[in-house]
Image (cartoon, grey):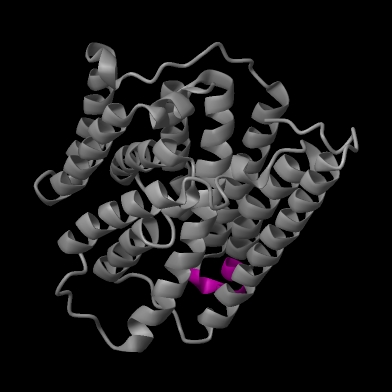
Amino acid sequence: MGGDEVLRQNRSLAVAWVSFLVVALLALDIVEGVAWGLIVPSAALVLVAIVPAMRPADEDRRIDRRDLVVVGSLYAGVVILFRIAFVAFGTDDVAGLFLAFAAGLVLGVVGPLIYSVRLRGRRLGSLGIGHHRLRETLLLGLLLAAVQFSMTLWGYDLPTPVDWVPLLVMSLVVGFFEAVFFRGFVQGRLQASFGTVAGIAVAAVLYSLYHVGYGMGADELVFLFGLGVVYAIAYSLVSNVLVLWPLLTPLGAFFNNLEAGDIDLPWASIAGFADVAVVMGVAVLLAYRYDRKRASLAARGYPDAAEVET
């Protein structure tokens, strides 16, 4: 039994971590970005170190080197494509920017689906995609989203639709990519090899550092590290990406983009992001059909189909 499974079965432990997440989000209103990005991970680490009841009990893990190579390769590919999009091309070449950006988004979803479901024979749920633990997932997702919404978009005076609808569409598409890639894939594989605490910590670091692809500076990366810890803990409680998407992470990104005011997207960009969403959706559907077919064959006694890795 993995550490995340132990965590889920211990109700009091789950309640304690949910409380931690709520307090961390509420602290965004009173603590500056860089300080928040340092305090939140430090507080989580202290709780794990000094409060035994807050510590997930991991069993011995077997490091899967193939997983780590693929995680590193796909991560490098995504960061490079984003860097090309936002730094090499930039707004001077909108077509190049979007194509490189779209390629990075697609790689971050399609790559893990092909590797995990097709090549390694894992269930789609190993990427956090499915209806497993749906009740707990939706309750936690709604709670965290409600806390965030109350501090950001509640009563917010939205600009004209052309200034916010494309931003919302972009936030939804990017949010799905981040949930599948960083939570279902990167964090899931790291936890499988190194355990819950190490998996959460390294996944949060990688989530922060990937934003260099957007051209972000050190202060923003520190804040995003803290945010990555919050997202990683939330995901570890239910192992379902619906805890973060389509509410928590897209709404947070949407608000930040509105506040920054430095992204100007035309209506036509909606079609581009819709195309990316369709590619992602088709990839998920094909993986789902393959997963179901393999499970059906295994249930009927076909030995090859039953060889499913976890």
Q: Position of residue 242 (x, y in %)?
A: 46, 54
Question: Magenta stretch: residue 242 in it?
Answer: no
In this picture, residue 142 sits left or right of residue 3: left
In this picture, residue 120 sits left or right of residue 259: right
Question: Magenta stretch: residue 92 in it?
Answer: yes
Question: Is 253 drawn above or below residue 79 in the view shown?
Answer: below
Please, what is the dominant secondary structure of the magenta stretch? helix
In what quadrant of the picture does the C terminus appear?
top right
Q: Is residue 41 visible?
A: no
Magenta stretch: give its range.
91-98
* Residue 84 falls in image quadrant: bottom right
In what quadrant of the picture does the N terminus appear?
top right
**Along the line of sight, the residue nearer the viewer: 55 or 221:** 55
Residue at left 14%, top 74%?
155
**Along the line of sight, the residue nearer the viewer: 123 or 94:** 123
In this picture, residue 174 sits left or right of residue 285: left
Residue at left 68%, top 22%?
64
**Along the line of sight, the residue nearer the viewer: 69 or 183:** 183
Q: Position of residue 295 (x, y in %)?
A: 77, 45
Residue at left 35%, top 46%?
217
